[in-house]
Image: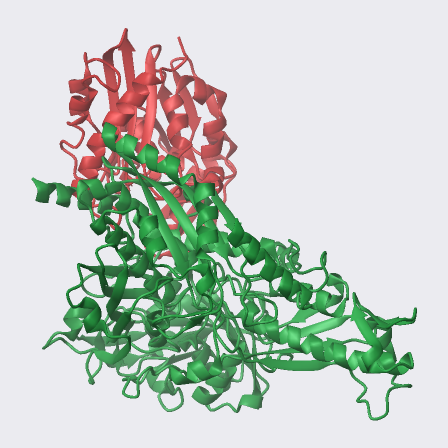
């Protein structure tokens, strides 16, 4: 109770500082999203909806081989098919296609293989583009693909990371199968393990996942002969523009990139894709507009994949369970090439394997491994879900080893609320947090003790359906990111964000943001922030985004950064607008600017009844008849914000799972999430993010897995094989929040885009293992399918027999 | 994905459909709800040269009580089957199993006859057809014929329908009083096909099992009738603690279940035994209200 009061006090302080506006203001209101009516009724522009005069359609022929040399290509039979305008193979683009970029060489000696957008002489994964047909409609393009003749000379596939690193393994690239080895350490790890009373040693497998955004990728490229416009379903129009300019040689100022409404990304559209580059090259060559929209099964093959790591984690602890040190050795599957941030994904997790716990030493090594599979890259959480999974799973193992309740082991090790700001063994300073408060709230909502009692009862009765309880007390680093930190990690770009606030003559406001929403609701949240800051009605704010012609500057949306970085840029721009307007207001009211106060959209001369609304100031500035001497006639302002630090949301997720020991089936009985994402701009949007995130994390725990066969063929190309849970497969989540504001930004916000996904996976698996621990089960590999649970039980029963 | 091109016909009467179908060549397919066929086309796993859409043929649709059996027209949608008072009263097992087919959107488009004619052993209805000894009514330009369920499912996605024949409906025999039913479906997500399914009908008198019918979903290239279970369950005590478990142990006998990403054959056999027991217990506990 005391702790919650303290959290409340900080919130109050932030409110008094003025960043959050007046009580009863827009920030904090569960506004319905202003973009939703447009999005859900389809009265909007998805890339695939775009029709242009003379639009041609592109279909890609994709490699059926995981690894092969291309020995012969004959595209001519396809050229005579009905409706076909052109057919190209990799050879046709070889002189101009360049290499798809990797912006994150994590070590100076990282091997970055040449990555042609269309394979020229060798293919290295099933699905790699080898040729394309451009035709007058989509159907004719698809039909003509079968007429292209390509001969392959098969090479050995490389599928298993351990085998890939072994002596004599076939090579994905001539340079070998290791891309890099990245190391990081803090404290004396040898001392921590020396004579440690308890050592836990586990290996976890983060299976490969396939991001499944509702809107498939789509590209429309066009040119007027001089400049180019690319509509694409992307999270990163700004980054993409720079990268495409560098890749294709089209000068940056001749290239406009537009992310129209985008239907989800989850990291999968944080990429410079082969298809984007190739569509630009095709339109450059033909002088005609072209469109490509991916089919779902094509997407499963060729959208970058996520996760795919083997985590070897060791924990040294005292007899009472106090953690002395954590050592992690990670193998990360890069796939066949390094894409935009492929090597950086596991490194983003490197600073999170300590979780919320205090320890004396930490040691981390990651080796990036090439295989003949689709490249991996960012997927919701990107490195941090993997890290959180490993530490939260292993804390349960530690609890079991020393025989205490898994919640107790966490209490003994976590950073206490009065210890913030706390600099972790990884050198990150967690600015604020209150793990006790979130946990107490979660335990109460969950009915922890009652469920534990039911668990013992079922164990005693030898009920075929056992009950397990899973805990995940997570934190994450988000708000990517301080540019200096990114630089120190060898990332090629910065992590600032930009906003322009334009005040129109009638007092309406346009906000141009460098973030690029693809489902997050920025139009609503940014409107709420601006409404409070400038005192204008919520409805009077329009948010422009995603078009490099109107929003020239930005770092886009990923890593839970939009609010914590982009939202702050909006706040700073609004502050500048207010300061300008104050000058005009003071001039018009014949007062000193120091005597002019601003609140709720009105400038008042202190101690008098004189006032002017911001709308009146806007009109006066537009007319410019009577402005202070030398005043530039505009209220518009820009701000570029570079955060000083990451933000650190945290929370406690509790999951109860029923495990049918006869069939191996699992059913989530209840799920409680208490998240602390700092101050909340829109609770409804936060709820949506948390619900979706939990679903996605549960999906990794129970359902999703990209499976390749021994020849390197992807077997999970359809949704019948690659299982995604729907609402019917998930329980109702109980969600709540504590609010411990971030101290590193004026809104006190932390970011919420990835929290649910990061937290939920270990909560579910911990619950399943907890249910089966009396049977001798210490782990179940993800996804914990019924068959896998059943086989795990059978194998331990076999051992005990 | 985009299907290869094909000719499309949409007749409005059965006679017209038969005529078009007969003239459309060997590679023509009948299109009903399209919920199984269209995915095959889009994945280019099937290349029919012509599609005869029977969706507008009124005489193929609807449920009728025909005395000793219920007639379900081939293009009656799953949703119509589930909601039909005649089906619910006289063939509750059909209603129970059909209600588990895919999701509401699919059930509003997919058809009863289409599902059966597709002859997918992972579909829920073929095992029910087998367990209930349904009779398939088929018409071609040369006339009508009937095919018992036991002779209808020949192999994976292969039925006894001959070129030019259209399934017009299915007769579901009324089993009479004293029966209880259950369809036990084990699947990984709500929309997924059954990993294994068990269609069970149990007739009992005073707690003793008199007669049992069990059809198994996805336990081989065709749906399977679990004859061993049916024989072993006769005369045993009904209920969870009776000898139904021993009878269910026979469930995997003679089956040849597939291996796929969701289950290997040995696991499917294990599931068949566990689920058959559960289905028998549930069926004997939920005796139908009919007298």
Taking the image as shown, residue A494 lies to the left or right of residue A489, namely right
Taking the image as shown, residue A164 lies to the left or right of residue A645, namely left
**On screen, residue A376 above or below B121:** below
Q: Position of residue A766 (x, y in %)?
A: 30, 49
Q: Position of residue A762 (x, y in %)?
A: 34, 54
Q: Position of residue A107 (x, y in %)?
A: 30, 84
What is chain A's hue in the picture? green
**On screen, residue A600 above or below A272:** above
Name the outermost residue toward the bottom.
A630
Which quadrant would residue A523 be assigned to in this image?
A: bottom right
Which quadrant would residue A345 be assigned to in this image?
A: bottom left
What is chain B's hue in the picture? red
Q: Identify which residue is drawn at 79% across, 65% down.
A: A600
Which of the pair A395/A313 is nearer the observer?
A395
Which of the pair A777/A116 is nearer the observer?
A777
Q: Identify which residue is drawn at 65% across, 67% down.
A: A526
Which of the pair A456/B249 is nearer the observer?
A456
**On screen, residue B100 above or below A4:** above
Q: Position of residue B289 (x, y in %)?
A: 41, 13
* Residue B131 in view: no
Name the outermost residue toward the left.
A801
């Amino acid at each position: 109770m005391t702790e919650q009061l303290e959290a409340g006090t900080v919130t109050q302080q932030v409110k008094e500082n003025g960043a959050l506006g007046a009580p009863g203001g827009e920030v904090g209101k569960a506004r319905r999203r202003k973009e939703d009516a447009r999005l859900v009724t389809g009265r909007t522009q998805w890339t695939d909806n775009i029709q242009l005069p003379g639009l041609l359609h592109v279909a890609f022929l994709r490699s059926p081989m995981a690894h092969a040399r291309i020995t012969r290509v004959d595209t001519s039979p396809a050229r005579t098919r009905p409706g076909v305008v052109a057919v190209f193979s990799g050879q046709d683009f070889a002189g101009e296609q360049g290499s798809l970029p990797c912006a994150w060489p994590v070590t100076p000696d990282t091997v970055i293989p040449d990555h042609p957008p269309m394979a020229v002489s060798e293919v290295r994964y099933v699905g790699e583009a080898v040729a394309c047909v451009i035709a007058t409609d989509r159907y004719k393009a698809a039909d003509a693909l079968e007429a292209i003749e390509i001969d392959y000379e098969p090479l050995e596939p490389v599928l298993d990371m351990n085998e890939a690193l072994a002596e004599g393994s076939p090579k994905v690239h001539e340079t070998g199968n290791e891309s890099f080895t990245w190391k990081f350490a803090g404290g004396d790890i040898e001392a921590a393990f020396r004579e440690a009373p308890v050592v836990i040693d586990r290996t976890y497998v983060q299976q490969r996942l396939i991001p499944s955004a509702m809107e498939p990728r789509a590209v429309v490229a066009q040119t007027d002969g001089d400049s180019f416009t690319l509509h694409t379903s992307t999270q990163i129009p700004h980054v993409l523009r720079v990268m495409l300019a560098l890749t294709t040689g089209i000068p940056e100022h001749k290239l406009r990139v537009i992310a129209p409404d985008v239907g989800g990304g989850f990291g999968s559209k944080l990429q410079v894709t082969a298809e984007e580059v190739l569509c630009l090259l095709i339109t450059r060559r033909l002088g005609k507009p072209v469109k490509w929209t991916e089919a779902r099964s094509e997407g499963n093959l060729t959208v970058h994949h996520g996760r795919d790591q083997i985590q070897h984690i060791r924990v040294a602890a005292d007899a009472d369970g106090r953690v002395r040190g954590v050592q992690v050795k990670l193998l990360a599957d890069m796939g066949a090439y390094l894409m935009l941030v492929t090597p950086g994904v596991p490194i983003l997790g490197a600073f999170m394997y300590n979780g919320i716990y205090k320890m004396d030493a930490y040691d981390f090594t990651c080796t990036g491994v090439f295989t003949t599979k689709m490249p991996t890259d960012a997927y919701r959480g990107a490195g941090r879900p993997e890290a959180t999974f490993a530490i939260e799973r292993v804390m349960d193992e530690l609890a079991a080893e020393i025989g205490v309740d898994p919640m107790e082991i966490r209490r003994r090790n976590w950073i206490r609320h009065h210890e913030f700001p706390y600099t972790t063994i990884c050198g990150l300073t967690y600015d604020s947090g209150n793990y006790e408060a979130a946990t107490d709230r979660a335990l109460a909502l969950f009915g922890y003790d009652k469920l534990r009692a039911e668990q013992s009862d079922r164990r005693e009765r030898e009920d075929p359906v056992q009950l397990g309880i899973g805990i995940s007390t997570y934190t994450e680093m988000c708000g990517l990111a301080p540019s200096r930190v990114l630089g120190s990690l060898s990332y090629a770009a910065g992590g600032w964000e930009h906003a322009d606030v334009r005040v129109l003559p009638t007092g309406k406001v346009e906000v141009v943001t460098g973030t690029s929403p693809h489902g997050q609701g920025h139009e609503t949240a940014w409107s709420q922030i601006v409404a409070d800051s400038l005192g204008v009605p919520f409805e009077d704010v329009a948010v422009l985004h995603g078009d490099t012609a109107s929003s020239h500057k930005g770092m886009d949306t990923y890593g839970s950064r939009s609010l914590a970085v982009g939202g702050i840029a909006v706040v700073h721009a609004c502050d500048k607008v207010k300061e300008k307007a104050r000058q005009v207001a003071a001039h018009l009211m014949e007062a000193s600017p120091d005597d002019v106060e601003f609140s709720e959209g009105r400038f008042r001369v202190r101690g008098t009844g004189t006032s002017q609304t911001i709308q009146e100031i806007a009109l006066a500035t537009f007319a410019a008849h009577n402005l202070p001497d030398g005043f530039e006639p505009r209220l518009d302002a820009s701000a570029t914000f570079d955060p000083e630090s990451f933000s650190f949301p945290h929370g406690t997720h509790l999951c109860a799972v029923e495990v049918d020991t006869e069939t191996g089936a699992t059913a989530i009985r209840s799920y409680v999430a208490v998240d602390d994402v700092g101050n909340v701009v829109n609770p409804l949007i936060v709820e949506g993010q948390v619900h979706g995130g939990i679903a996605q994390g549960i999906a990794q725990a129970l359902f999703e897995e990209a499976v390749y066969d021994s020849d390197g063929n992807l077997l999970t190309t359809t949704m019948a094989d690659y299982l995604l849970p729907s609402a019917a497969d998930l329980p109702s989540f109980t969600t709540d929040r504590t609010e411990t504001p971030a101290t590193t930004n004026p809104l006190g916000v932390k970011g919420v885009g990835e929290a649910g996904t990061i937290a939920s996976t270990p909560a579910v698996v911990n619950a399943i293992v907890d249910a089966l621990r009396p049977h001798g089960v210490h782990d179940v590999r993800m996804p914990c399918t019924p068959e896998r649970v059943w086989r795990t039980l059978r194998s331990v029963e076999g051992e005990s027999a | 994905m985009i299907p290869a091109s094909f000719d499309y016909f949409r007749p409005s009467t059965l006679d017209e459909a038969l005529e078009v179908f007969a003239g459309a060549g060997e590679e023509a397919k009948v299109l009903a709800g399209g919920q199984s066929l269209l995915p095959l086309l889009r994945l280019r796993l099937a290349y029919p040269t012509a599609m005869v859409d029977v969706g507008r043929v009124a005489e193929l649709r609807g449920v009728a009580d025909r005395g000793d059996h219920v007639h379900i027209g081939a293009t009656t949608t799953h949703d119509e089957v589930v909601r039909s008072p005649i089906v619910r009263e006289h063939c509750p097992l059909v209603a129970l199993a059909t209600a588990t087919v895919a999701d509401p959107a699919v059930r509003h488009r997919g058809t009863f006859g289409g599902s059966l004619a597709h002859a997918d052993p992972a579909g829920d209805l073929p095992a029910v057809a087998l367990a209930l000894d349904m009779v398939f009514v088929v018409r071609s330009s040369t006339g009508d014929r009937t095919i018992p369920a036991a002779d209808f499912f020949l192999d994976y996605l292969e039925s006894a329908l001959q070129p030019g024949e259209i399934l017009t409906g299915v007769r579901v025999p009324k089993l009479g009083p004293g029966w209880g039913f259950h369809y036990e479906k084990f699947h990984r997500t709500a929309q997924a096909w059954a990993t294994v399914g068990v269609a069970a009908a149990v007739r009992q008198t005073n707690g003793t099992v008199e007669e049992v019918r069990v059809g198994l979903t996805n336990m081989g290239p065709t749906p399977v009738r679990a004859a061993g279970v049916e024989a072993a369950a006769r005369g045993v005590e009904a209920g969870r603690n009776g000898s139904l478990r021993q009878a269910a142990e026979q469930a995997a006998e003679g089956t040849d279940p597939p291996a796929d990403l969701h289950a290997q054959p040995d696991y499917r056999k294990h599931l068949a035994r566990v689920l058959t027991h559960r289905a028998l217990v549930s069926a004997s506990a939920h005796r139908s209200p009919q007298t």
